[in-house]
Image (cartoon, rainbow, N blue to C red):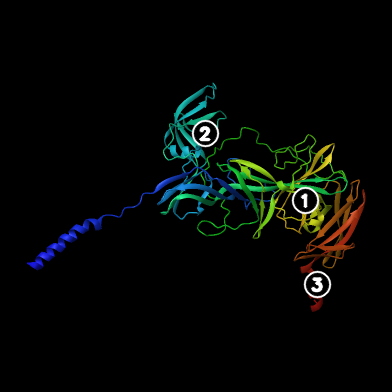
Amino acid sequence: MRGAARRLLLLLLLAALLPAAAAPAQIPARTLVSSAGPDRVALTVYRDPARDKDAFIDDDADEPLKGYALITETRIVDLPPGPVTIRFEGVASGIQPETAILVGGDPAEKNQDRLLLSERGLIDAFTGQHVTLRRADAATGKVIEERARIRSSSDGIILETARGFEAVHCTGLSQTLLYPGVPPGLSAKPVLSMTLDAGSGGRRTLTLSYLAADFDWQANYVGHLSADTGKVDLFAWITLASRDDVSFANAQTAAVAGQVQRVTPDGQGISDYGDEEEAYYSTTCWPQDTTGSPPYTRPLGPDSYPELLARAAERDGDYGYGWGGGEGGDEIVVTGARIARQEDLGDLKLYRVPFPVTVAANAQKQVALLSAKKVETELVYRTKVHENDETVEWLLRVHNRKGDGLGMPLPMGQIALFQQGFGRPMLLGETAIEDKAVGEEVEFVFADAQNVEVDAEYLGEVGASERHRLDVANANPFPIRFEAEFQDRSYTRYDHFSGRIVRREGMNVWRVEIAAGGRARLDYRETDIEEEEEDELDEVTGS
């Protein structure tokens, strides 16, 4: 009996403990904390790695920019004790959430709320549903409203009405979509949320860093060529561009020059992150204006020297050069404290803006990059004989060193060259350069020369060589420096020059001064290397 009583008592005790053991552990509730915006922000913009030196930043607001930015936000938040979810409101709309790093907290989870209160968000939310289409009647011009259903495609917004299917904004008349309400879950600001593990709570300073798409920058140079000395005053802007929906006020801003290697999310190959698919809505309609070609404009070039005056009209300041604001083309005056400071960033170059600037949403901002006075230059007329082209180009050659007035890394960009004429700056030409390091020779190649002609004359053969004569005529009322380049190939060699030749960048170069209205002549041979080797072999073998 005693053994049975003990077993019964043990079973009763186990039964009493089982509910407690089977009950699930209580999960602490997570508190939601919102941060409305950053207290401080820093913005570092990286160029579109695929954009060519000759290309301007695309000014089509419907096209995404292919550069990106590293954004660092400092936010001060009050956190309760225990686990908490923080909503970071006002992050860049182009944020790449997988790149987000939080300093000052230990995130266990992060999420991006992409449902924004925007045209895109509303179209996404109401696709397949009915909305109200308000538009002007094509016949009467009277504003009418009718019921429509959104049927969108990758090429644009398609509406289904009682009249059938039609594209939005293709009539040339005003059209507006009216929605019955705000769909649940849409946020007026981009939001990134992060969940932190349990903590002691209190006021925290958090630093959030992430990459965001839809940014870009470029350098725009302005040169003023002196008619008296031939020297150039060189000024440059950093043009920052943002297609993001968020503005960054009083941001510590910088721009990075150089190629940054990035990989696709799956790690397979290099990517500029510019090809990520985004649902940008646009309409494709027949053109409303002419479909003809634009009028031809003669290439700009120097017609006289020392007063090089372009015949074309002066260019308005809509190309991003910003060459001055006065009636007669006032000189740009920027103090050194307002010019971007260049720093090394590994193998890259970083240009830091020394004062806070506001990078507005869907806008551009220009900041001074450099200001160099009386830079030594060399005006050269040049032809490239090895390209079998008698075209003569004119260029300005600059040595990027302090002794010549420069001596700083020059980022890729476009340059507009001006010279004073008729009491105002006149445009001589535009061109572009690649990234140039300190100590490099920089050539600004502007246009084909109008008053310098080259004639290549065939004089006959000598064995495996052809004899040629290069005749150069200078129709300018001033003397010029002329260069002819001869680049040997694997199958061709140039030799037997009748004039003085110098070696420059692996090429033979004939450099000569030609007087005003004068001529110069050079005889040379062009040898077919394969034919020459065959002739030598025949001599050895006696065949």
* SS for callout 1: strand
- Against 209, residue 162 (above or below) is above
Tell me which amino acid carries mark 2: Val
Which of pointers 3 and 2 lies earlier in the amino acid sequence?
2
Judging depth in this view, the residue of 493 and 348 nearest the camera is: 348
Residue occupying the point 69% across, 54% down = 342
| Residue occupying the point 58% across, 45% down | 64
Which residue in the protein does label 3 denote?
A: 535
Tell me the crowding category of disc 2: few under 14, some 14 to 19, or many 20 or more residues within 10 angstroms, Cα based.
Answer: many
Query: Is the C-beta separation of discs 3 and 2 under 8 Å?
Result: no
Q: Earlier in the sequence, mark 3 or mark 1?
A: 1
Identify residue for label 2: 168
Separation of disc 3 and disc 1 at Cα? Answer: 41 Å
Dot 1 or dot 2: first in sequence order is 2
Amino acid type, mark 3: Asp
Q: At which x and y percent is residue 189?
A: 50, 41
* Residue 38: quadrant of the picture: top right
SS state under label 3? helix
For disc 1, the marked residue is 445
Residue 170 lies, with reference to residue 391, above or below; the image says above
Where residue 523 appears, as percent x and y from the top left, is 88, 60
Residue 243 location (% of width, % of height): 58, 43
Residue 242 or 49: which is nearer the viewer? 242
Q: How many marks?
A: 3
* Camera sees residue 372: yes
The residues bearing labels 1 and 2 have C-alpha atoms spaced at a distance of 46 Å
Q: Secondary structure at mark 2?
A: loop
Nearer the observer: mark 1 or 2; the answer is: 1
